[in-house]
Amino acid sequence: MTPIVLPVQPLTPSAFAPFGEVLALEGADSFPINGGRTQRFHALGRVRCLGRDANVVLSIFRGQPLVPPVLDLMERHPLGSQAFMPFSGSAYWVIVAPPGVFDPDAIQAFLARGDQGVNYFAGTWHAQLLPCDPDADFLVVDRDGAGQNCDIVRLKPPRTWC
Amino acid sequence: MTPIVLPVQPLTPSAFAPFGEVLALEGADSFPINGGRTQRFHALGRVRCLGRDANVVLSIFRGQPLVPPVLDLMERHPLGSQAFMPFSGSAYWVIVAPPGVFDPDAIQAFLARGDQGVNYFAGTWHAQLLPCDPDADFLVVDRDGAGQNCDIVRLKPPRTWC
């Protein structure tokens, strides 16, 4: 099937608000700590970890570009938020749909800069990691524990973006 | 008072084990996800959030170098872990002492590369952020909530490092 082409938007907190939080400096409030030597941009995101027998863990994902850029599945984690912060400078695409019953007409695509993180709400549908560059490294903050925490949906037709 | 000079060690998981976890690729186990396009270096660190009425939050710290490099206080957060992941590439110094009663003879200094994070255990004594470069940005994962979660100790004499 010929892919549907999604228009790519820049990643901003307001545009991303239905899906999660943007972890970035611009537009964020801050206050000085460490005797004025550090600015704390506080609580840009909040971690959610639902259900029993679970921990919040810190992992690293090293991702490769999707070639060709044809997306045929999305996933969600109903029991926890999931944050991605790039630390090797790679920009990446963020393709999402709102939490709840999957709506293929509600998919949106964003381009995140290499100094912008995202924190998906629990249940937000999202593509797997889509870095622009090879060997792109991300700190990931998510839930590890008992329970079914990954649902998958197939995209027919698939999506691409520009 | 003339500062005591701490020898600086490279940051490795084994050397840092009394104080917390190192968030870095080398020596870490991983497994493929996302159809083989991503390697997950899973649970390099675990987030702790103790006490009531508290959340784990995602913040950004923008830090400046300590000039001159003379350290006269350390702090600890007894109710939660605190993770720092640099994302603007700056190396940074990590100066720590083990959790428990503060022991000035047990202070150790490490140099973390710009692609290495740290996750302090709850209660680990540590210096405030000590980046090598100006405008150094870090994603921070820590606890936000009720309760006394910051103790401070003064260093007499102060410490420097080389």
Image (tube, coloured by chain):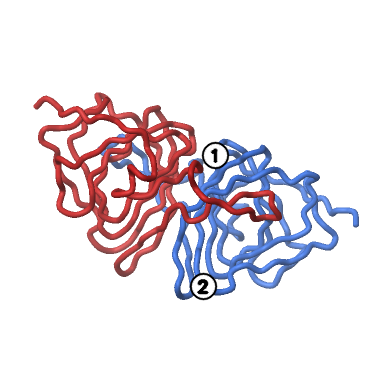
Chain colours: A red, B blue
How far across and how far down the image is residue A130, in percent?
Answer: 32, 34
Label 1 marks a residue whose chain is B
- Is residue A2 shown to the viewer in this render? yes
Q: In what quadrant of the picture does the N terminus of chain B appear?
A: bottom right
Q: Which numbered mark, 1 or 2, is in the foreground of this view?
A: 2
- Is residue B29 shown to the viewer in this render? no
The residue under the point 80% across, 54% down is B159
Q: Residue A93, relative to residue A39: is it above or below? A: above
Q: In what quadrant of the picture does the C terminus of chain B appear?
A: top right
Depth check, front residue: B95 or A123: A123
Q: CA distance from mark 1 to mark 2?
A: 32 Å
Residue that label 1 marks: B115
Q: Is residue A157 left or right of residue B156?
A: left
Q: Are marks 1 and 2 on the same chain?
A: yes
Q: How many marks?
A: 2
Q: Which mark is residue A88?
A: none
How far across and how far down the image is residue A98, in percent?
Answer: 23, 49
Label 2 marks a residue whose chain is B
Disc 2 is placed on an element classified as loop
Q: Which amino acid type is shown beneath numbered disc 2?
A: Ala
Q: Residues within 10 Å of mark 2 (few under 14, many from 20)?
A: few
The residue under the point 19% across, 54% down is A100
- Callout 1–callout 2 Cβ contact below 8 Å: no
Depth check, front residue: B110 or A35: A35
Q: Is residue A30 left or right of residue B58?
A: right
Q: Which amino acid type is shown beneath numbered disc 1?
A: Asp
The residue under the point 54% across, 70% down is B79
Q: Residues within 10 Å of mark 1 (few under 14, many from 20)?
A: some
How far across and how far down the image is residue B21, in percent?
Answer: 54, 54
Depth check, front residue: A103 or B155: A103
Disc 1 is placed on an element classified as loop
Residue that label 2 marks: B146
